[in-house]
Amino acid sequence: MKSNQITIVDIANELKMSKSTVSRALTGHPNVKTETRAKVMELAEKLDYQRNMLSISLITNKTKTIGIVLPEFITSFFPQVVVGAQEEAARQGYSVLVSQCNESYDTEVANSKVMLANRVDGVMVSLTKETLNYDHWKAFIRKKIPVVFFNRVCEEMMVPKVVVNDYDAAFKAVEHLIQIGKRRIAHLAGPSQLVISRKRMNGYRDALKKYDIPIDEELILEYDLNLSKVKMYVKHLMDLDSPPDALFAVNDPTAIEAIQIIKKLGKRIPEDIAIVGFSDNYGSSFIEPSLTTIAQPVREIGRTAMELLLGLMDKDISEWKPLIKTLDAELIIRNSTVAADKGV
Amino acid sequence: MKSNQITIVDIANELKMSKSTVSRALTGHPNVKTETRAKVMELAEKLDYQRNMLSISLITNKTKTIGIVLPEFITSFFPQVVVGAQEEAARQGYSVLVSQCNESYDTEVANSKVMLANRVDGVMVSLTKETLNYDHWKAFIRKKIPVVFFNRVCEEMMVPKVVVNDYDAAFKAVEHLIQIGKRRIAHLAGPSQLVISRKRMNGYRDALKKYDIPIDEELILEYDLNLSKVKMYVKHLMDLDSPPDALFAVNDPTAIEAIQIIKKLGKRIPEDIAIVGFSDNYGSSFIEPSLTTIAQPVREIGRTAMELLLGLMDKDISEWKPLIKTLDAELIIRNSTVAADKGV
DNA sequence: CTGTTAGCGCATTCAA
DNA sequence: TTGAATGCGCTAACAG
């Protein structure tokens, strides 16, 4: 079926010249008379000619499109990453195909197929919390399509990754809790298949060790990031014979949920229990008490991952270096750990 | 440049049959011997063959891709709409190309060109707050590419649109403020070029009229949705000789900002001033006091818009009906208008 | 049921 | 500097 859009042929006919000349004029080829080029450009403009990327892609075997596959789209984190990534992509003349997986492994696999079918030039991936098998991403490497992971990365694949210093940040967060005098620090951790969960957990453990605080496994709960379960875990912790005096949550949505539950329980934050989150999501600054958390350079993560990915574009697969970029995340101290005295 | 991916030719050669047979087998054409099809499918599976959508699109002149152009990606609203839209698209075998405009008209125009170059089969659009000229979208109609607007719609274009009953919802919100005894109700409105701003404004005005409350233009401020300016507007209102006893904000981010400022000013909410927002964004339920607002069926908006758009796909342009779907938005009453008595 | 041929829109050889 | 011819990977029309 013929397209109903303007093509090079239309321009060529109108101008009574060959398609190849028109093509050359349009693509900025040097061997075209200035006058000819001007005529072509003018008519193209007038007819609102738009290059058909499909045919160009078919020939060049490049689509100038990057796939971005995300675990979810609900928290403010991933959309912001996309903004950074898209900015960098646009700057280098690339479009972006975004898809989110509702934290489902099956959807992730399906989305990876969509990316392949659309012949993206590369993919930027953050894994779902369910993902344990990486064959669908390894297939990209086999087909020489570059993959860059960010945030939720795959450890066993030797490809570039962009992460924040989760370990250090978690360490600092817990150290902060210790420094304000807390000793029974609970950790509501993420699922252990996620590297970030494990790193944050390690930071937590090592901070306690450094200050010779015995690690009480009773205070460490691993959960699947399903927010509706936070209530159960928090209640469980608060019902312990010796309840925690602080809580380090794996992320902000979890911490925010916990704050609301703890307030309903009639406990004071931070006096009875101090709380720290991770990511500085929207809302963390105005929940009461405001949440002490770790701020991640969100857009920067997207921009960097895209930069790394596009950097692989013209290189042979043998030159792909599994560079791991670690960006700094910072502790932001707010009222959930250090109460401000302000009149209400 | 040859692709380094498996093609139909590879399979045909290996199996010593014609490309057309392989193609037919792969696409589920009826006229293929079961045995032949089985052989092809098996080898395709084994070689991890992936159909090249580019060439198919070039032939069929359909990309099975829908563009979604958004004004921003920061508030939780638009990403959620995308989730709904993407679900429906996937259900019907379509991919989605998402781009956001940072509320910039120029970026919107640029993004529309990207969509054209990528030959999307249709676009789902919500305008930036700057957009006053719609030529770039009219060009789509001229090229027979269907356009559906949602949320921030273009009134002068006769295409399908998905909106919520902004007028009614605003009316109900203000009526609610009146019913709890407020009389000097201010409105921090959105830019008047946005239809939603005007509709919400009209709902506000008509509610006051219905209850014979004189409209005080002093209490109506139009602003550009730049949150950093909320402080100025709120202070201005509170400094009036006769300050407002209620505030209807054009959206939740604005209302949340206002709440924080008013609290710092030492005023009580809702006693001194009650506040209502619009959209029920993330955070509105846990800011203190929790925000009375209008809940929009966010995913439903995305799903419906995509449905409308895909519904136009096989139809001739003459059959495109400028159907306007209006979804219901509901008032959610929280503590920013009706204080709950709870011990702290 | 299977093979052959043409062509989608364009960039890119090779000739002129 | 320009034109003619080839083909990217695939589907569809036409034969056999």
Image (tube, coloured by chain):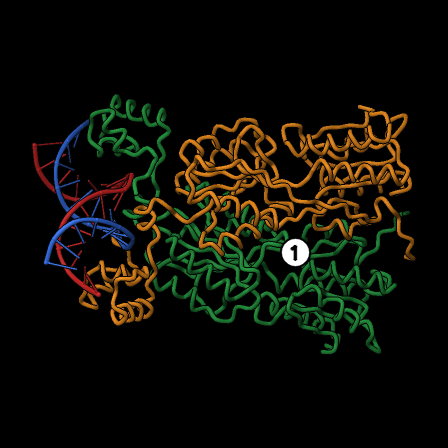
Chain colours: A orange, B green, C blue, D red
- Asked where in the image residue A131 lies, by quadrant, the reply is top right
Asked if one can make out residue B79 in the rendered structure from this viewpoint, the answer is: yes
Q: Residue furthest front?
A: A319
Instruction: Check the image and report above or below for B246 versus A131.
Output: below
Residue in view at x 76 percent, y 52 percent? A285
Residue in view at x 30 percent, y 48 percent? B58
Image quadrant in which the N terminus of chain B is located: top left
Number of marks present in the image shown: 1
Q: Nearer the viewer, residue B323 or A297?
A: A297
Relative placement, left or right, of A264 versus A249 is right
Disc 1 secondary structure class: loop
Rendering coords of residue B105 (x, y %): 52, 66
- Asked where in the image residue A105 lies, by quadrant, the reply is top right
Q: Nearer the viewer, residue A325 or A258?
A: A325
Relative placement, left or right, of A223 versus C16 is right
Asked if one can make out residue B80 in the rendered structure from this viewpoint, the answer is: no
Rendering coords of residue B191 (x, y %): 62, 70
Which residue has dot 1 on it?
B279
Q: Nearer the viewer, residue B169 or B190?
A: B190
Residue in view at x 81 percent, y 24 percent? A218
- To which chain does the residue with label 1 belong? B
Which kind of residue does numbered mark 1 sit on?
Ser
Instruction: Check the image and report above or below for A137 versus A20.
Output: above
Residue in view at x 79 percent, y 70 percent? B235
| Neighbours of disc 1 within 10 Å: few (<14), some (14-19), many (20+) | many
Rendering coords of residue B221 (x, y %): 70, 73
Relative placement, left or right, of A42 versus B66 is left
Q: Nearer the viewer, residue B232 or B169?
A: B232
Instruction: Check the image and report above or below for A233 versus B190.
Output: above
Rendering coords of residue A34 (x, y %): 28, 70
